[in-house]
Amino acid sequence: MSWLIEGITNDGRTFRPSDWIDRVSGAVASFGLDHRLRYGPVRPCFIAGKRCLLMDKSLQNENPVAFEFVQSFVRLNGLRMSDFEAANKPADPDGHGSVLGAVA
């Protein structure tokens, strides 16, 4: 279960700066033993050809501080956030149909 956060504000404008997804996901990522950046419950992805951010709902219980950080960012910037599974249910019963690629 995840939330989808789009780079579009509630009034329909494209959110700037364009690297906001990298900044937010990087702020809650960690480095693995191989010294490579590992995304956890907050990760960049492509949905219908657009870069978005997916946030696992488990983050709220697993890391409340990170959850509040992302929620505050979304609220302060008026970004569109929706339930990812509900948004993709009609297109694909598995809920993965419109995910064109995920950035690992």
Image: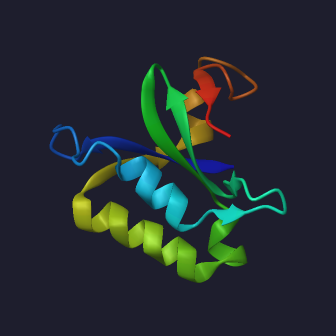
Q: Using the image as rendered, state which of residue 87 and residue 7 is in the foreground.
A: 7
Q: Position of residue 81 (x, y in %)?
A: 41, 49
Where on the picture, by quarter, is residue 77?
Answer: bottom left
Q: Position of residue 3 (x, y in %)?
A: 54, 50
Q: Position of residue 99 (x, y in %)?
A: 60, 25
In the rendered structure, the answer to whether residue 32 lies left or right of residue 55 reads right
Q: Using the image as rendered, state which of residue 19 and residue 97 is in the foreground.
A: 19
Q: Position of residue 7 (x, y in %)?
A: 33, 42
Where on the picture, by quarter, is residue 103?
Answer: top right
| Residue projecting furthest to the right | 33
Above or below residue 61? Residue 11 is above
* Residue displayed at 30% across by 52% down: 79
| Residue projecting furthest to the bottom | 65
Above or below residue 46? Residue 42 is below
In the rendered structure, the answer to whether residue 99 lies left or right of residue 36 reads left
Above or below residue 64? Residue 23 is above
* Residue displayed at 42% across by 57% down: 23
Q: Name the quarter where the C terminus is drawn.
A: top right
* Residue displayed at 58% across by 21% down: 98
